[in-house]
Image: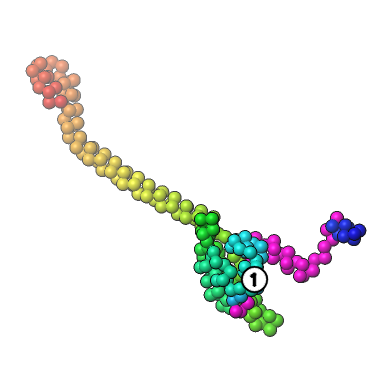
Amino acid sequence: VLVSRTIWLHRLVDITPEFAAREIIDTMNDALIVMDLEGVVRLVNQETCSLLGCLEQDLIGRRPVYGMTACRRFAEILESIVGKGAVRNVEAECGPRNGVCSTLNLSASLMRNHRGQPVATVCLVNDITDRRRAEQERERLIAQLQEANEKLQVLDKMKTNFISTVSHELRTPLTTIKAFVELLLLKQGMPEERKVKLMNTV
């Protein structure tokens, strides 16, 4: 009892390779799936069960397509990479769970024995659903901005054309009006009939 209490108080845990390996596996943020060369799942961690929405006993000792019923497409991809070597950033849909589909990112590599022979496929999986949604939202916003920019360019062109047209169309009559008004101002003693005629023209 005293030894147990001392170990508990001072956290005197013997960190053996076996203990460390299991603790590391169970505290990983990524889902870990280890399959033998026949494609049978031999090891998963807690994150795998959370991510795929299943229990460890549903996966261990079974091929992915039989244990991962909610993620059929992902399970098929897992089976297709068994014994194939390194795989990086393969994306697959999983679900729906609670009405929502998840996007999973898979990387895998071969585990070899001391003779260099492959013995298992080690897979790391993480959920990139939020990142995918953020990227899609960003692309949607970029598309909206491009569309708005194109509309602004059209409006700017219309404005330029309008100003050009108005300037051209008004130049001649405005020149005439200006000339008549200046004539009226300069020739104060002009006969009244002539003034009325000029004003009517203006």
Q: Position of residue 128 (x, y in %)?
A: 55, 59
Q: Amino acid at mark 1?
A: Ile
Q: Where, by quadrant of the figure, is residue 36 drawn?
A: bottom right
Left or right placement of residue 42 versus residue 104 in this view: right
Identify whether 12 is placed above or below 41.
above
Identify whether 160 is placed above or below 13.
above
Residue nearest the observer in this picture, 44 or 91? 44
Which segment did they paint magenta? 9-38
Residue at x-position 63% and y-position 80%: 118
Figure colour scheme: rainbow
Residue nearest the observer in this picture, 8 or 135? 8
Badge count: 1
Identify whether 110 is placed above or below 181.
below
The C terminus, quarter of image: top left
Q: Secondary structure at mark 1?
A: loop
Residue nearest the observer in this picture, 23 or 61? 61
The N terminus, quarter of image: bottom right
Residue at x-position 26% and y-position 43%: 161
Residue at x-position 35% and y-position 45%: 152
Residue matched to label 1: 60
